[in-house]
C-alpha cells in the first residue's frame, strides 16, 4: 500500500513530498518502507513542484510532443503523476486545515483561561478602585504644604 508523505528538512526549511510504499522485511521481521521522491512544496503557493530528471519541466519541443494524444493508449503515467500531485495538494490542504484547527483550539483555550482569571480578579480590582477613589478625595481635600 502506498501513501503520500511530507517531510521537513530542518536545515533548509524545505518540505519534500514522497510516495511511501510499505513492505515486510523477512530478515529483520519488521515492516519497512520505500520512499520515492515526488517533489517539494512551494512555500508561496503550497503546490508540489516536481524535482529530479523525471519531474523537471520539459523544453518547448518536448512539451509539444507530450501534449499530442498517443493512439496506443499510453500516457497513463502522466495521469498517475497528476493523481499523485493532486493527492499531495490535498494532503497539504488537509495539513493546513489541521494546523489552523489546532491554532483555533489553542486560542479558544487561552480566551477561556483569561476569562476565568478576569472573573476571579474582578472583586479585587473593584476594591482597589474604591480605595484609589477614597485616596483621591483625601488628597484633594488636604491643604497643599507651604
Image (spheres, rainbow, N blue to C red):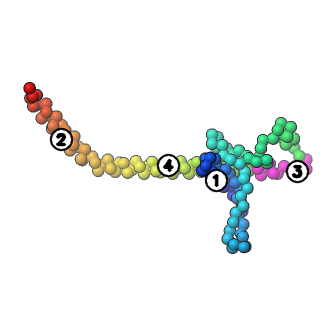
Residue 137 x %, y %: 14, 34
- Of mark 2 and mark 3, the one earlier in the sequence is 3
Looking at the rendered image, the quarter that the N terminus falls into is bottom right
Q: Earlier in the sequence, mark 1 or mark 4?
A: 1
Mark 3 lies on a secondary structure that is loop
Cα distance between the residues tagged 3 and 4: 48 Å
What's the mark number on residue 131?
2
Q: Is residue 134 magenta?
A: no
Mark 3–mark 1 distance (CA, rounded to whole Å): 35 Å
Quick check: is 76 in the magenta stretch? yes
Mark 1 or mark 2: name the one nearer the start of the chain. Answer: 1
Which residue is label 4 attached to? 103
Q: CA distance from mark 1 to mark 4?
A: 21 Å
Of residues 67 and 31, the one nearer the viewer is 31
Q: Give the CA separation, mark 1 to mark 2.
A: 59 Å
Q: Which numbered disc, 3 or 4, marks the residue closer to the eye?
A: 4
Question: Dot 3: within a 10 Å radius of its alpha carbon, few (fewer than 14), some, or many (20 or more) residues?
Answer: few
- The residue that appears at 71% across and 48% down in the rendered structure is 39
Image location (x, y in percent) of residue 67:
84, 41
| Residue span colored magenta | 71-81
Residue 125, position as x, y percentages in the image:
25, 44
Is residue 140 at least partly visible in the picture? yes
**In the displayed structure, does residue 104 sit left or right of residue 69?**
left
> Which structural element holds mark 4?
helix
Numbered disc in front, either 3 or 1: 1
Contact, mark 2 vs mark 3 (Cβ under 8 Å): no
Q: Which residue is mark 1?
A: 7
Residue lying at 64% horizontally and 53% vertically, measured from the top left: 7
Residue that carries the numbered disc 3 in the rendered image? 73
Q: Residue furthest top?
A: 146
In what element is the residue under mark 1?
strand
Amino acid at each position: 500500500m502506498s501513501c503520500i508523505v511530507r517531510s521537513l528538512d530542518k536545515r533548509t526549511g524545505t518540505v519534500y513530498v514522497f510516495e511511501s510504499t510499505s513492505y515486510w522485511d523477512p530478515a529483520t521481521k519488521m515492516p519497512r518502507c520505500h520512499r520515492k521522491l515526488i517533489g517539494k512544496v512551494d512555500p508561496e503557493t503550497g503546490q508540489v513542484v516536481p524535482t529530479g530528471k523525471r519531474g523537471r519541466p520539459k523544453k518547448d519541443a518536448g512539451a509539444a510532443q507530450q501534449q499530442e494524444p498517443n493512439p496506443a493508449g499510453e500516457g497513463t503515467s502522466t495521469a498517475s503523476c497528476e493523481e499523485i500531485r493532486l493527492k499531495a495538494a490535498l494532503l497539504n490542504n488537509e495539513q493546513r486545515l489541521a494546523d489552523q484547527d489546532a491554532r483555533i483550539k489553542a486560542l479558544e483555550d487561552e480566551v477561556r483561561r483569561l476569562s476565568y482569571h478576569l472573573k476571579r480578579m474582578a472583586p479585587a480590582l473593584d476594591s482597589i478602585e474604591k480605595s484609589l477613589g477614597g485616596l483621591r478625595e483625601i488628597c484633594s481635600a488636604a491643604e497643599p504644604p507651604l
